[in-house]
Image (cartoon, grey):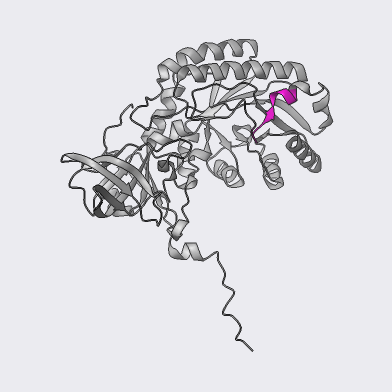
Amino acid sequence: MTADPPAAHCQGLALTDLAAEFGTPLYLYDADRLRAQYTGLRERLHPALRLFYSLKANPNVAVTRTLRELGAGLELSSLAELATAQRAGATGDEMLFLGPGKSRDEIDACLKAGALLIAESLPELADIDEAARHRGGTAEVLLRVNPAFALKGGGLTMGGKPRQFGIDEEVLDALDPAGLRRYGNVRVTGVHAYMGTRILAAAAIVENTRRILDLAARLAGRLGFELGTVDVGGGLGVAYHAAESDLDADELTAGLNPVVAGFHAAHPGTRLVMELGRYLAAPAGTYLTRVRYTKESRGERFAVCDGGTNHHMAAVGIGSPFRRNFPMHRVGGGGPLVPWNVTGPLCTPNDTLGKAVDLPADLGPGDLVAVARSGAYGPSASPVLFLSHGHPAEVLVRDGRAHLVRRRDTVDDLLERQSDVGPAAPAP
């Protein structure tokens, strides 16, 4: 793995001080690292390929604004993400909205905001058409295609299989060229495809992009629509585990830029988009949890912490056939290393952040454990309400200052939306 050195500070601020100020469990985001991930790729990449941030990776508004200020467009999948994008300063077609089960409220909100809708099925295209007709306007829409081909190289393959996402390529191939004209209040202006996630092989990303661009040009020519935008997906991964290596941005762009340049020369009026979520957010985040107790059980050491998989479900290994530990360390380090099972406070054996993690032998109550590369698919992709522990605090360090960008849930927060039916009526 491309190792990040065990950190004791974030932009000069001690992690121990931040944990003392904001409490634990705590998600900590480094704005400098967010900027470095974005600009490191942006500066190498062909200028015709726009980078969009996928909010599903981390929808915190402060994280979103940091990337938006650098020039990232935003890819969204819910009303709350749309509101977050607008709060972060995005407008119009700087926002792409996708998802296989859009509600009428979501469609209407996108039409009002000018966000580009990505239709995932022909019935959804009909719903968008009806919504646009009701508003007395025309909706610009991209068609999400489920390609007939699939490429290896991702943690989750999205093409070449039966999926709820997108319109099968063969369905579009069988569609009468006049078929899209039945949707009189929709103007198809492009194509979207997404082939997989957590891709660490540069060659796979290059090949995905080449084939999606070819597919988009072919479909536009056959069905007679203008290619205003082609979204080639993305799925760029980051290394979490010892046997993995990070993507080399130079290797990636050396292969990708000629593909983009060739398509751009043939289609100079087409906006090209790549979606990035995990790649931008993951390296910028650290999950801090404090050891409450240590114990030994049948020859294995356990560090029981105040936070666990209720905040960091990705550590369970979702999407992987077996558990592999995220990089983690004791803040402050020190001492010989021995295997520890790092667990949380939940009443389930699945609440294990790390299995046989090398940590100091003298790890004890009060110590901070930092789980690195945790900026993506953290609390928003975790069962934060399990056992009613609630959402952890989130802090963004920006320009050397720590900002609380989400306070932790209190007991009152968790109960205020509930209502009681009152005591049962006494028996007659």
- Please indicate whether residue 354 sits to the left or right of residue 198 in the image: left
Asked whether residue 375 is in view, the answer is yes
Image location of residue 224, percent across then percent down: 77, 19
| Numbered marks: total | 0
Seen as rendered, the residue at the extreme front is 298
Quadrant location, the C terminus:
bottom right
Between 181 and 31, the one nearer to me in the picture: 181
Magenta stretch in the rendered image: 163-172
Seen as rendered, the residue at the extreme bottom is 428
Image quadrant of residue 43? top left
- Please indicate whether residue 39 sits to the left or right of residue 191 in the image: left
Q: Residue at horizontal 61%, vertical 83%?
A: 425
Seen as rendered, the residue at the extreme left is 335
Image quadrant of residue 95? top right
Between 355 and 376, the one nearer to me in the picture: 355
Q: Residue at horizontal 57%, vertical 69%?
A: 419
Q: Residue at horizontal 36%, vertical 32%?
A: 241
Image quadrant of residue 187? top right
- Is residue 126 magenta-colored? no
Image location of residue 285, percent across then percent down: 38, 39
- Please indicate whether residue 236 sits to the left or right of residue 228 in the image: left
Between 347 and 233, the one nearer to me in the picture: 347
Q: Residue at horizontal 49%, vertical 46%?
A: 380
Image location of residue 186, percent across then percent down: 77, 32
Asked whether residue 275 is in view, the answer is no
Image location of residue 301, percent across then percent down: 25, 48
Quadrant location, the N terminus:
top left
